[in-house]
Image (cartoon, grey):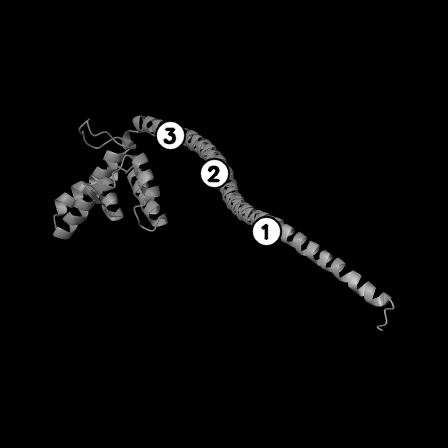
Amino acid sequence: MKNSSFDMNEFMNNEETPVEANVEASAEAEEQAEAPELDVQKAVVESLAADKAELDSKLEAIKAELAAKNTELEGVKSGLEAKEAEIVSLKEQLASKNAEIEANKAEIASKNAEIARKDAEIAQNLEKEFDMQERNPNALALLDRDVDIPDRFPGETRDHVLEVVKEAREAAEKEGRIRRAQVLEGVLVANEPNGNLAKKRESMEKLFNDNGNIVNGTVIEELKNLGITHKNGEEYLLPSEIIKRNY
């Protein structure tokens, strides 16, 4: 007869197997149910990541564009500052030039006043000299002359004539023309030169010597004041030629 005693452990083992199978089946079912949902979430995450990457790219492009605009703006600002500095400099130069012009105007006015004073002084001295000449018979010309060629200074004609007489007397003596020499000597003894011609010649020689015997601006200006030309047509005259032509 078989032992029919009840084995509790065997009973328990037989009871647990269906339960575990049910749990595993349930978990597997849940995993199968969750799989589509995870795929959807994964797709959403990937889409969001792609959108974020696109937005990041656009943001970087905007930042780069803003940086370029800022650089351009700084360049424009720097250019404007340079232009403003240039304008300020030009204004300062203009003010300086205006001040220089005003100073030159004042100097010119002073020079004009000085010239007018000298002209008046010269005119006064000439008036005195000619008045003295009229009162001194020895200062008058030896011979009548063309009234259209008046003396430029007192005694000019007289001094020229006496110089010619002196040169003629010296030539006559060398040539043995005794009578001519005696007559001319008598004229020289009776008529003393005024002396102004020699003074004018010496003054002109000094003017050229002081300027290195060069017909420069200073010499030309003085010659203009004296009514003397420094050219023969278009050619400049030498100092010696100017003196010979006028004195």
Distance between the Cα atoms at labels 2 and 1?
76 Å
List x then y, in percent, for residue 200.
Answer: 31, 40
Q: Residues within 10 Å of mark 2 (few under 14, many from 20)?
A: few
Looking at the rendering, in which quadrant would you find the N terminus?
bottom right
Q: Which residue is mark 1?
A: 39
Query: Which one is in front in this view, the residue at disc 2 or the one at disc 1?
Result: 1
- Residue 220 visible in the shown view: yes
List x then y, in percent, for residue 27.
Answer: 69, 55
Q: State the SS at label 2.
A: helix
Q: Which residue is mark 3?
A: 119
Name the residue type under label 3: Asp
Query: Which one is in front in this view, the residue at disc 3 or the one at disc 2?
Result: 2
Whether residue 144 sits left or right of residue 218 in the image: it is left
Q: Is residue 138 above or below residue 220?
A: above
Residue at the image point whose x is 76% and y is 58% from the top: 19
Residue at the image point whose x is 26% and y is 35% from the top: 156
Name the residue type under label 1: Asp
- Residue 195 visible in the shown view: no
Q: Which residue is mark 2?
A: 90
Name the residue type under label 2: Leu
Q: Is residue 241 above or below residue 117?
A: below
Q: Is residue 225 above or below residue 27?
A: above
Distance between the Cα atoms at labels 3 and 2?
42 Å
List x then y, in percent, for residue 136.
Answer: 31, 29
**Tags 3 and 2 touching, CB below 8 Å:** no
Specify which label sits upstream in the sequence, 2 or 1: 1
List x then y, in percent, for residue 102.
Answer: 47, 32
- The answer to which quarter of the image holds residue 164 is top left
